[in-house]
Amino acid sequence: MPTREEKKKISSKRWRDEHKIERAIYDKKFRDEDPLRYWCISSLTVHKRKGCDINITWQELKEIVKRAKFCSYCEEELDWNRKGTVYSKSPTIDRIYNERKIDQESIRIVCLRCNLIKGNEIGTKLKARLKKLIENVPE
Ligand SMILES: [Zn+2]
C-alpha cells in the first residue's frame, strides 16, 4: 500500500501527465512574461529537488541575476536570451563551496561550462585538477 505521501506524489504526477499541453502553454507564457523570474524560480526548484536548503527568495535571486552579465569564473558573457534550451554560455547557480544550501553568500552565477568543469570539487583539490588539465592540453 502506498503511504499518504506516495499517494500525493502519484496523483500529482498523474495530474502533471494529464495536463501536459496546458502546462506547456502556461509554462511558455510564464517564461515569456518575465524570463529572469522564470530562470530564478526554475533554478531554485531544481536545487530544492536536489535536496538543497533554500534560504533565498526568487526576488532576491533576481536582484543578483540582474547584475550577472559575465561568468564569475571565465568572465565570458552569459547568455540570458536563450529560451528553453541550455548550452555552454547558459547561466547557472554555482554553489561556491558545494554545500547543500542556497543563500546570498553561498552562490554566484557562472556559465554552464564552468559549472560542469568545476564539478563537485572546491579549493586546492579543484585547482590541482585544473592545473593538470591545463598541463595536458596540447598547444
Ligand atoms: Zn564560465
Image (cartoon, rainbow, N blue to C red):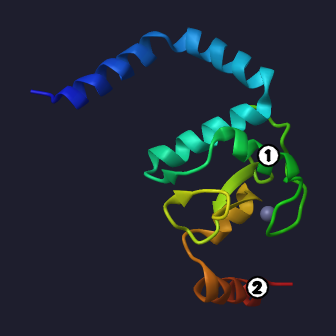
Q: What is the C-alpha distance between the residues marked 2 and 1?
A: 35 Å
Look at label 1 and name its amino acid.
Glu
Towards the viewer: 29 or 119: 29
| Residue 14 in the image, given as x and y percentages of width and height | 36, 17
Relative side of 39 to 47, left or right: right
Quadrant where the image shows the C terminus: bottom right
Dot 2 or dot 1, earlier in sequence: 1
Tell me which residue sits at (23%, 30%) in the image.
6
Towards the viewer: 5 or 59: 59
Towards the viewer: 61 or 7: 61
Relative side of 114 to 21, left or right: right
The part of the image, by quadrant, that contains residue 80 is top right
Quadrant where the image shows the N terminus: top left
Q: Is residue 42 visible?
A: yes
Residue 134, disc: 2
Q: Secondary structure at mark 1?
A: helix
Q: Is residue 85 visible?
A: no
Towards the viewer: 132 or 39: 39
Residue 63, disc: 1
Relative side of 3 to 112, left or right: left
| Residue 91 in the image, given as x and y percentages of width and height | 76, 50
Look at label 2 and name its amino acid.
Ile
Q: Which label lies toward us, 2 or 1?
A: 1
Residue 15, disc: none
| Residue 138 in the image, given as x and y percentages of width and height | 80, 84
Residue 33 vertical placement versus 124 (above, below): above
Tell me which residue sits at (23%, 23%) in the image.
7
Residue 39 vertical placement versus 114 (above, below): above
Relative side of 12 to 6, left or right: right
Tell me which residue sits at (64%, 68%) in the image.
96
